[in-house]
Image (spheres, rainbow, N blue to C red):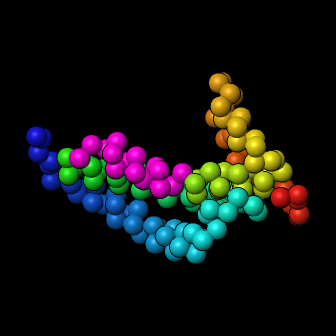
Amino acid sequence: MFILSRTFICSIYNSFKIILHHLHSLIFWLCIRIDIFVQFNGRARRREFWMFVLFNLIISILISILSYVIGVDVSFIGGLYSFAILLPSLALCIKRLHDVGKSGAFILINFIPGVEFIWFLILVCTMGDPGENTY
């Protein structure tokens, strides 16, 4: 087992301190919006989508670090978390597609090899349609 140096631990601590400083508003925002994460109708703005992605990225990193420190296989804990956020992630992606004027069925484009990620990334980064749309 390798021993962590003091400078390495201090740098990790300072990094987490900076992240936690900004995480307060993120957690507050997510607690307000958590009730609508499993609804498939409506629209999701870019900020709502990217805040959800950021929150999941931070949680995934923390799970990886925690599982390394504890000595548990990361795939078990990560799999549980992935299963827990599957439905909210799917709902949010569909609502983001609604915001840019596309049907939720366009999420199936992610299964086409070579096109999937780039096309979906372009869609979620574009500004939503102004005013009312059919969704």
Q: Position of residue 67 (x, y in %)?
A: 27, 49
Task: Describe residue 133's horizontal placement relative to residue 14 as left or right.
Answer: right
24 vs 11: above or below: below
User: From this viewpoint, is residue 25 visible?
Assistant: no
Which residue appears at 23% of the width and 47% of the height?
A: 72
Query: The N terminus lies in which quarter of the figure?
Result: top left
Residue 15 falls in image quadrant? bottom left
Looking at the image, which is closer to me, 133 or 1? 133
Task: Describe residue 86's horizontal placement relative to residue 101 as left or right.
Answer: left
Q: Position of residue 50 (x, y in %)?
A: 60, 55
| Residue range (magenta) | 72-86
Residue 17 falls in image quadrant? bottom left
Q: Position of residue 56 (x, y in %)?
A: 48, 54
74 in magenta: yes
Which residue appears at 46% of the width and 67% of the height?
A: 22
53 in magenta: no
